[in-house]
Amino acid sequence: MRAVFITGASGGIGAALARHYAARGAVVGLIARRAEGIAALAGELGGTVWTGAGDVADAAFMRRAADAFMQAHGVPDLVVANAGISIGTLGAAAEDLAVLERILRTNVLGLAATVQPFVEPMRARRAGTLAGIASVAGFRGLPGSGAYSASKAAAITWLESLRAELAGSGVRVVTVCPGYIDTPMTRVNRYRMPFLLSAGEGARRIARAIDGGRTFAVVPWQMAIASLVLRGMPNWLYDRLAARAPRKPRVGDG
């Protein structure tokens, strides 16, 4: 690929994807909230790297960033809306409503604000790929992670709608649903994480799914089987099993 634009690029999957594509000679555009994080990564990558620091949920910022990148390097071949946050929440806790809003703004609005500025330029060129990083957590409501599960379910559905809207345009929309990837987001989990992948291996498999022409992918494939079982499980059984499942720490949990 000639040019790739990635959000949430200062660490985790985003940084690993940047390393993957930069190693293959692509121009990479990196967006993250932490300027120092992407500056350090840009210095590591070498080659041609464009950076911008800001909040993906700020649509005006994302429009300016997209325009600046395209003015410098043209319409990218691939946009990866990867930025996301995960914090444990409880539906009964009034104080978690603010956390819900924050998660939805980043994981849903931020995804849409990342992708939207590139839709018409790609459609005019009749080529390009828009990839959104969702999660297997979006397949069922996980207790203690209602905000995160809801945000990823919304991301999956929003990307599906966009895919249908762009059918026949030459622009491909890809939904990627990772399972457990070893990143700062998952290292706070206090429970066993099956089929855990390193960030580098997770990025390699995600890139393979995107570059291979997929429109929907679960990474790793073992989580796809587990997800099918969960989605097909009757509510009475799911509720019984999920009620005993370990939960992600909330803000302020010791």
Image: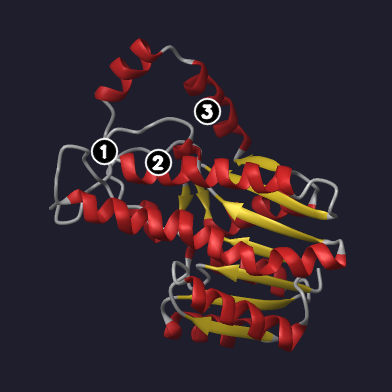
Which label number is shown at residue 182?
none
Crowd around label 2: few <14 · some 14–19 · many ≥20 (10 Å) = many
Disc 3: which residue: 227
Tell me which label, 2 or 1, sits earlier in the chain: 1
Q: Amino acid at mark 3?
A: Ser
Residue 41 in the figure: left or right of residue 182 = right
Which residue is pictured at 29% across the width and 33% down the height?
143
C-alpha separation, residue under disc 2 versus residue under disc 1: 12 Å
Disc 2: which residue: 150
Q: Position of residue 248 (x, y in %)?
A: 28, 44
Which residue is pictured at 35% across the width and 38% down the height?
192
Can residue 163 be seen here? The reply is yes
Which residue is pictured at 70% across the width and 74% down the height?
22
Residue 113 in the figure: left or right of residue 126 = left
Disc 1: which residue: 144
C-alpha separation, residue under disc 1 versus residue under disc 3: 18 Å
Q: Position of residue 209 (x, y in %)?
A: 72, 48
**Does the CB distance between marks 1 and 3 fall below 8 Å?**
no
For residue 149, which quarter of the picture? top left
Q: Position of residue 103 (x, y in %)?
A: 35, 55
